[in-house]
Image (cartoon, helix red, strand yellow):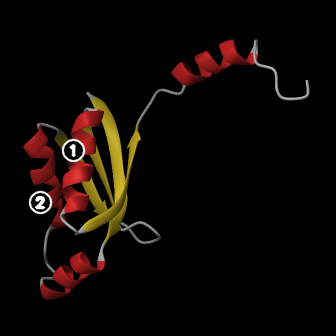
Amino acid sequence: MAKFYLMGNYTAQAFQGLLKDPNSDRSKAAQAAADAVGAKLISYDALRGSLDFIVLVEGTFDQMAGVKLATEASGALTNINICEAIQMSGPATQAVKIAAKYKAPGK
């Protein structure tokens, strides 16, 4: 299974819900979303900064895209970015092949 980081923001609607219930455990919601598609939640963290949360999940891209679609459609989350963890040697190997043949404009 691939590892994916999903990070994004809460909406004003979600913040209103958190004000009503400040002890709401959002990791349980993340767990439910992962379970619904057969993925494995590794961790959930609230963040300080321009993003409000980050979730580490093992699964497939289709599963993660489904989580994004459903949770953003709920109106509670927005701006979810899906990033897949990779081994850098794979893209670097491909880049070596390309660099040998690619010519920049004007060269």
* Disc on res. 51: none
Disc 2 marks which amino acid? Lys
Q: Residues within 10 Å of mark 2 (few under 14, many from 20)?
A: few
Disc 1 marks which amino acid? Gly
Task: Identify the residue at image location x=21%, y=44%.
Answer: 66
The quarter of the image holding the N terminus is top left
Task: Identify the residue at image location x=82%, y=27%.
Answer: 104
| Percent of width and height locating residue 92 | 61, 22
Q: Nearer the viewer, residue 95 or 28?
A: 95
**Which label lies toward us, 2 or 1?**
1
38 is higher (above) or lower (below) than 26: above
69 is higher (above) or lower (below) than 51: above
Query: How many numbered marks appear?
Result: 2
Left or right, residue 5 beside residue 73: right
**Residue denoted by label 1:** 66
Residue that extends furthest to the right in the rendered view of this protein: 107
| Percent of width and height locating residue 32 | 9, 53
* Disc on res. 28: 2
Which of the two discs, 2 and 1, labels the residue nearer the N terminus? Answer: 2
Left or right, residue 19 beside residue 53: left
- Report whether residue 67 is seen: yes
35 is higher (above) or lower (below) than 62: below
- Report whether residue 59 is seen: no
Left or right, residue 40 beside residue 53: left
Q: Nearer the viewer, residue 72 or 51?
A: 72
Mark 2 vs mark 1, CA separation in Å: 17 Å
| Percent of width and height locating residue 80 | 35, 56
Q: Nearer the viewer, residue 46 or 69?
A: 69
Residue that extends furthest to the bottom in the rendered view of this protein: 20
The quarter of the image holding the C terminus is top right
Occupied quadrant, residue 78: bottom left
